[in-house]
């Protein structure tokens, strides 16, 4: 879901490197996946990240070596996977979220497989239960983040809701991502549609535009170049104290800071959150389906689920999986996030994005 893209970018902005699985050839000396191959290939967006010891545990447990192919941001990776579905680049695809899920399913991207850990996935994240073409892997909230120091200096209360963002006191303060090119941008658009309905979201965006909202192509530019509260934004002398990002961005600011602050420098406007869920699936025509199944089983397991938060800054979907204290303290999930049925997203997404583009960018 573009929800994980921010981790690598944020770490790079702070001079750090996240752990990620690297490509490897099969233990039988052959490259790539295929019949008899001991390599399983995962295709993902650019922000796949996992601890090396977790990869080693999977390889020891399954007997397969993991090869990871990172293929652009979430939307780009999904579209490319659809175009290559008859001759897929790998065995498993990870990174399609609920905003794009229907596109993948309608185009026959995945074959049916019920991962062994699926019964441990929290019920609210399960979809496609009749065919089991995708496995829920993680979740997170797209929310407006604010720069605490900026608002304290101005003696201005940060916004809490969508309604607040169109008030005069917040004019020229918000930067958002393009809904046509960015996963969090699309998530924020869907959040406004969930809040104001089919008939009201366009009027809301007219007010937001009149109130000086700035639109940029993607999360990296919005968060690290335009948002004054981020480490990257401070270096860039950014001047927008409000940005569409994630509920997990504040703990990332704490964890990657040196020295670590006692409190997060950024906060979340909880009344602006939209919940995203990210899925993985066994690709149609996968050359190594057995290896793919083993990988999906592992991704729902406790060790992988509990490894994700500090690597991809997302929440696990497995019941009982533990999250780091930093998440509990600095980035708790929204209590009442906006949500939308995937079928409604499928029915309206393309037209909403088209209308949004015409309304906001022209």
Image (spheres, rainbow, N blue to C red):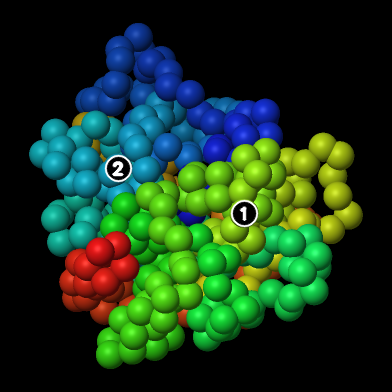
Please state the horizontal and vertical placement of residue 149, each as a whole percent of the image: 78, 60
Residue drawn 22% across the image and 68% down it:
358
Q: Which residue does the image show at 33% across and 89% down from the upper left? A: 200
The image quadrant where one finds the C terminus is: bottom left
Mark 1 is surrounded, within 10 Å at the Cα level, by few (under 14), some (14 to 19) or many (20 or more) other residues, namely some
Task: Assign the N terminus to one quadrant of the image.
Answer: bottom left
Residue 353, located in which quarter of the rendered image? bottom left
Q: Which residue is mark 1?
A: 239
Question: Do the residues bearing badges 2 and 1 touch, measured as CB atoms within 8 Å?
Answer: no
Q: Is residue 312 above or below residue 159?
A: above
Q: Which residue is mark 2?
A: 77
Q: Earlier in the sequence, mark 2 or mark 1?
A: 2
**Quarter-of-image position of residue 127:** bottom left
User: Observer-nearest residue: 356 or 67?
Assistant: 356
Q: Secondary structure at mark 1?
A: loop
Q: Position of residue 269 (x, y in %)?
A: 63, 73
**Is residue 52 something one can see in this rendering?**
yes
Residue 75 percent location from the top left of the image: 30, 50
Residue positioned 35% across, 9% down in the render? 29
- CA distance for labels 2 and 1: 32 Å
Q: Position of residue 203 (x, y in %)?
A: 34, 85
**Which residue is pictured at 37% across the width and 54% down the height?**
182
Picture quarter containing residue 41? top left
Which of the two residues, 133 or 353, is positioned nearer the viewer here?
Answer: 353
Question: Helix, strand, or loop for circle 2?
Answer: helix
Side of 103 where 176 appears, left or right: right
36 left or right of 254 in image: left
């Amino acid at each position: 879901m573009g929800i994980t893209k921010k981790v690598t970018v944020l770490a790079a902005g702070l001079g750090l490197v996240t752990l990620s699985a690297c490509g490897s050839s099969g233990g039988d000396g052959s490259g790539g996946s295929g019949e008899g191959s001991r390599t399983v290939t995962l295709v993902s967006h650019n922000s796949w990240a996992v601890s090396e010891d977790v990869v080693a545990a999977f390889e020891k447990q399954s007997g397969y070596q993991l090869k990871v192919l990172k293929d652009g941001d979430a939307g780009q990776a999904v579209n490319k996977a659809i175009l290559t579905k008859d001759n897929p680049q790998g065995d498993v695809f990870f990174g399609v979220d609920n905003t794009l899920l229907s596109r993948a399913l309608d185009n026959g991207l995945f074959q049916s497989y019920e991962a062994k850990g699926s019964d441990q996935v929290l019920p609210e994240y399960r979809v496609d239960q009749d065919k089991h073409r995708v496995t829920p892997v993680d979740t997170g909230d797209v929310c407006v983040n604010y720069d605490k120091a900026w608002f304290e200096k101005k003696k201005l209360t940060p916004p809490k809701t969508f309604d607040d963002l169109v008030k005069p006191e917040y004019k020229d303060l918000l930067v958002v991502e393009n809904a046509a090119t960015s996963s969090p941008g699309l998530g924020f658009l869907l959040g406004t549609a969930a809040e104001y309905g089919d008939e009201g979201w366009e009027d809301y965006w007219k007010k937001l535009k009149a109130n000086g909202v700035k639109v940029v192509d993607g999360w990296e530019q919005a968060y690290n170049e335009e948002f004054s509260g981020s480490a990257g934004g401070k270096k860039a002398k950014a001047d927008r104290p409000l940005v569409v990002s994630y509920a997990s961005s504040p703990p990332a600011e704490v964890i990657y800071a040196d020295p670590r602050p006692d409190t997060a420098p950024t906060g979340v406007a909880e009344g602006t959150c939209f919940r995203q869920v990210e899925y993985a699936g066994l690709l149609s025509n996968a050359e190594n389906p057995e290896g793919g199944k083993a990988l999906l089983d592992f991704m729902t397991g406790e060790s992988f689920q509990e490894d994700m938060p500090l690597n991809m800054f997302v929440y696990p979907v497995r019941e009982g999986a533990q999250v780091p204290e930093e998440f509990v303290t600095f980035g708790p999930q929204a209590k009442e996030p906006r949500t939308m049925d995937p079928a409604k997203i499928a029915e309206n997404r393309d037209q909403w994005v088209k209308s949004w583009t015409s309304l906001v960018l022209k």
